[in-house]
C-alpha cells in the first residue's frame, strides 16, 4: 500500500517570498502524484499532477512541482506567494494500473502574511 | 457546469438519529467518491463507485455507514445511528473516468455535527 508524508503541518511565509511545501511518498509500484489545494470552507481543487514524462510539472496559480523518483519526493514550489495563496495544501498518490484510489497526506497549512 | 453539488452544507443532529448526505456528481462523470475529513485522521476515502457500482468500500468505518448510487446523477451516504465521533466534513468527488490518473473534482462538503 502507498503512503504520503507531509512533514510540515504549517508553513508561514511573507507575501512575495518563495515557498516550498514538502511531500514524500512510499509505494512498491509506480505512482501518479497530485497536489490539491483547499481554501477555507471549500472542497479540494487540483493544482497539478504528475503522470509521466517531464519531472517538472507546472500547475495553476503559478505553482510547480518536481518529481524525484530516487528521493521519492514531489515538492511543491512557488517563486512568489500572494495573500490569496493562504490555504491547506494536500499531496496525494495513486498507484498506476489500478483503480481510482487516492491516498492523501495530512496537509500543510500555508499562511501568507504581509 | 455547476460542479459537484452536495446537500446539506451543514447538519446538526443528535446521537442516535439517522443522517443522510446527498451528492450530485458532475454530469458525464462515471466515478464517484465519498471522503471524510477530520482533524485527527485527515482525509479518508470511504467508498467509491464506478458506473454506479460500488468498487471499494473498505474505508467505510462500520455497518452504521451505507452508501448508494441509484443512478449516474445521485448518491447518498447514510449514517444510522449517528454517533458523536461521526462529526466531520464529508466530501463527495467525481471523475470523468475510472483510473488512478484521473483528476477528482470535489464538492464543497457537508459539515456534520453529532451532539
Image: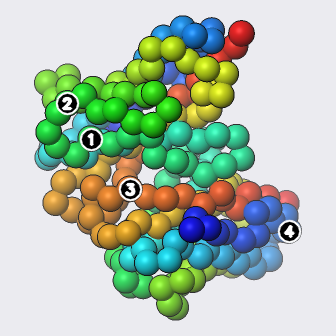
Same chain for labels 1 and 2? Say yes or no: yes
Residue A49, percent across and down?
Answer: 33, 42
Colour scheme of the rendered structure: rainbow
Relative depth, front residue between A79 and A92: A79
Q: How many discs mark residues in the rendered view?
A: 4
- Tag 3 secondary structure: loop
Q: Residue at x 30, y 69 (%)?
A: B98
Residue B64, percent across and down?
Answer: 61, 76
What residue sits right under mark 4 in the picture? B14
Give the foreground label among 4 and 2: 2
Relative depth, front residue between A56 and B19: A56
What residue sits right under mark 1 in the picture? A50
* On-image quarter of the C terminus of chain A: top right
Residue A8, percent across and down?
Answer: 49, 21
Report the Cα–Cα distance between label 4 and label 2.
50 Å
What residue sits right under mark 3 in the picture? B103
Report the Cα–Cα distance between label 3 and label 1.
11 Å
Report the Cα–Cα distance between label 3 and label 4.
36 Å
Report the Cα–Cα distance between label 2 and label 3.
18 Å
| CA neighbours of label 1 inside 10 A, class few (<14), some (14 to 19), many (20+) | many
Report which quarter residue B20 is drawn in: bottom right
Question: Is A40 positioned to the left or the right of B55 in the image?
Answer: right
Mark 4 belongs to chain: B
| Residue that lies at the very extreme toward the bottom in this rendered image | B70
Mark 3 belongs to chain: B
Q: Are marks 3 and 1 in contact (CB under 8 Å)?
A: no
Give the foreground label among 3 and 4: 3
Mark 2 belongs to chain: A
Question: Is B16 positioned to the left or the right of A75 in the image?
Answer: right
Residue B60 visible in the displayed image: no
- Tag 2 secondary structure: loop
Amino acid at each position: 500500500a502507498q503512503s504520503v508524508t507531509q512533514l510540515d503541518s504549517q508553513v508561514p511565509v511573507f507575501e512575495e517570498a518563495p515557498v516550498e511545501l514538502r511531500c514524500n511518498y512510499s509505494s512498491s509500484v509506480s505512482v501518479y502524484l497530485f497536489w490539491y489545494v483547499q481554501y477555507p470552507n471549500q472542497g479540494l481543487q487540483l493544482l497539478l499532477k504528475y503522470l509521466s514524462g517531464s519531472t517538472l510539472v507546472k500547475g495553476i496559480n503559478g505553482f510547480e512541482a518536481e518529481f524525484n523518483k530516487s528521493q521519492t519526493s514531489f515538492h511543491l514550489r512557488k517563486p512568489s506567494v500572494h495573500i490569496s495563496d493562504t490555504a491547506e495544501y494536500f499531496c496525494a498518490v495513486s498507484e498506476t494500473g489500478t483503480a481510482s484510489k487516492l491516498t492523501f497526506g495530512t496537509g500543510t497549512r500555508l499562511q501568507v502574511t504581509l | 457546469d455547476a460542479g459537484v453539488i452536495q446537500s446539506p452544507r451543514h447538519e446538526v443532529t443528535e446521537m442516535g438519529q439517522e443522517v443522510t448526505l446527498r451528492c450530485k456528481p458532475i454530469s458525464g462523470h462515471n466515478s464517484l467518491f465519498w471522503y471524510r475529513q477530520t482533524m485527527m485522521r485527515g482525509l479518508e476515502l470511504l467508498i467509491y463507485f464506478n458506473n454506479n457500482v460500488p468498487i471499494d468500500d473498505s474505508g467505510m468505518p462500520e455497518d452504521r455507514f451505507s452508501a448508494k448510487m441509484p443512478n449516474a446523477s445521485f448518491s447518498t451516504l447514510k449514517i444510522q445511528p449517528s454517533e458523536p465521533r461521526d462529526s466531520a466534513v464529508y466530501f463527495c468527488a467525481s471523475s470523468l473516468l475510472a483510473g488512478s490518473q484521473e483528476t477528482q473534482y470535489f464538492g464543497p462538503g457537508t459539515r456534520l455535527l453529532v451532539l
